[in-house]
Image (cartoon, rainbow, N blue to C red):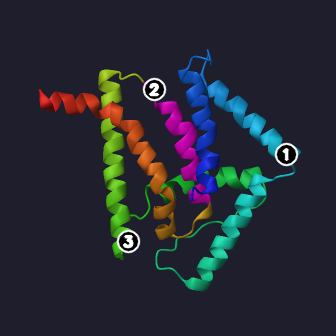
Amino acid sequence: MVKPYFLASLVPALIIHIVWQRGQIQKSPWLGWASLAIIIVASLWFLDIHPIEHIARKQNDFINHSAIIGPGSEIHLTPLQNTPKSILVELPTSLFNVLIEPLPTRVTRPGEWVMLIENIMLWSLIGLSLWQLYKHRVHQTNIHLVIQGIIPGLLLIGLISPVLGATMRYRAPFLLLLILAIIPYLHPLITSRDE
């Protein structure tokens, strides 16, 4: 079953990516994405659906549940308020929790070791792809898809999940898409080794 947060993060970016690739957006996929985001927010407001309230409530439920079961990989999250400012202030911490935690100094369990190794491999691939992008000026066809579709999903996970084990499960499809998106930037490195 596909999780709603996965669809909510990825579908708008995929729509814009497909339309842009077909040449139906002449200027920029960023403008198209911003326009679609405004339309979605306006539609939610019209339907009396409040995503910020839902995110804050979901995080609060997750924190309360974690306090009951006492997971070993729990991390501290600042409880969100039902305001845009509360969400915006926590975005850097959210991304840190999803892409950098656990730090080597706090790893004590096998699952945390797995997540740490995942992070090291992921950042190695990102570093290599950025180097190849800079060195070979590779065409940046996937960058906007990564930022518009994958990063929002990771931010959402980081805002809601206070347990690293759950974070590792929830982020898996996004990391797979991220790796698939950066593979083309590693192509010059792979071909140069084959020569």
Q: Give the SS element for disc 2.
A: loop
Viewer-closest of 75 and 31: 31
Q: Is residue 173 visible?
A: yes
Residue 23 in percent (x, y) is at 57, 16
Residue farthest along the left direction in this orientation: 195
Residue for badge 3: 111
Viewer-closest of 27 and 180: 180
Q: CA distance from mark 1 to mark 2?
A: 33 Å
Q: Bounds of the magenta span?
A: 140-159
Mark on residue 141?
Answer: 2
**The residue under label 3 is which amino acid type?**
Gly
**The residue under label 2 is which amino acid type?**
Thr
Residue shown at 52% from the left, 70% from the top: 163
Earlier sequence position, callout 1 versus callout 2: 1
Q: Give the SS element for disc 3.
A: helix
**Left or right side of 159 for 110:** left
Q: CA distance from mark 3 to mark 2?
A: 34 Å
Residue for badge 1: 45
**The residue under label 1 is which amino acid type?**
Trp
**Left or right side of 60 for 124:** left
Q: CA distance from mark 1 to mark 3?
A: 40 Å
Would you place residue 40 above or below residue 163 in this image?
Answer: above
Name the magenta segment's main secondary structure: helix
Q: Are marks 3 and 2 in contact (CB under 8 Å)?
A: no
Dot 2 alpha-carbon crowd within 10 angstroms: few under 14, some 14 to 19, many 20 or more: some
Give the quarter of the figure containing the N terminus: bottom right
How many tags in the picture?
Answer: 3
Q: Is residue 103 magenta?
A: no
Instruction: Give the quarter of the image for residue 162.
Output: bottom right
Give the quarter of the figure containing the C terminus: top left
Q: Give the SS element for disc 1.
A: helix
Residue shown at 31% from the left, 52% from the top: 121
